[in-house]
Image (tube, rainbow, N blue to C red):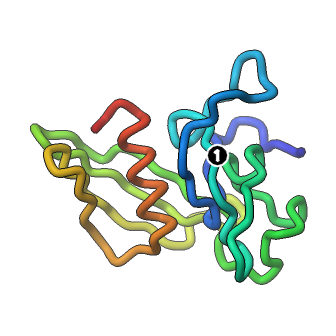
Amino acid sequence: MARHVGLVPVPCPYFLPQAPLQETKWAVPPRAPLGVLHAGECRAGTVPQVADHERCNFGYARGECGKFPSDAAVDAVRFAVDSREPGLVRILYVLEREHAPLEHGRLTFSIADRRLEGAETSPLLEAQARVFVERSGLG
């Protein structure tokens, strides 16, 4: 699978992470955009399918994954910590196409009640953001 040198890995926008992978083919797993590699579902089609661990965890699968829609508006999702304060973590998300920002927004994660608030987002984006916060040791 082709990788773009120097770019931080980002998850596929159609990936629903469900649980950390217990075993991988790597002796030392690569840096994962959601903190650790996850098993989950591919939601690119009309019926959820078992995710391809490498493509789904790392995004930019257009032309490399037969499930990835050729007319998809977004190639990957990027997350970053915006700020932290007691009880709250604010994160930024960027939806990308061809390594360029297409849409962005801010989400706030309440540590005490595990609630994610912010702009109207898709269930997949919300699931990825929640995993990003929790697995990055922020929440």
Determine the residue positioned at 69% across, 25% down: 29
Determine the residue positioned at 54% across, 43% down: 19
Determine the residue positioned at 33% across, 51% down: 91
Q: Position of residue 118 (x, y in %)?
A: 27, 68
Q: Is residue 94 left or right of residue 47?
A: left
Q: Residue furthest left?
A: 86
Determine the residue positioned at 52% across, 42% down: 34
Q: Position of residue 3 (x, y in %)?
A: 82, 42
Q: Is residue 10 left or right of residue 103?
A: right
54 up-or-down from 96: above or below: above
Depth order, front residue of 63/126: 126
45 up-or-down from 77: above or below: below
- Which residue is disc 1 drawn over? 39
Image quadrant in which the C terminus is located: top left
65 up-or-down from 72: above or below: above
Q: Position of residue 20 (x, y in %)?
A: 56, 37
| Amino acid type of the residue that numbered disc 1 sits on in the rendered structure | Ala
73 up-or-down from 63: above or below: below
Q: Quadrant of residue 7?
A: top right
Q: Position of residue 95 (x, y in %)?
A: 54, 66
Q: Is residue 83 left or right of residue 13?
A: left
Secondary element at tag 1:
strand
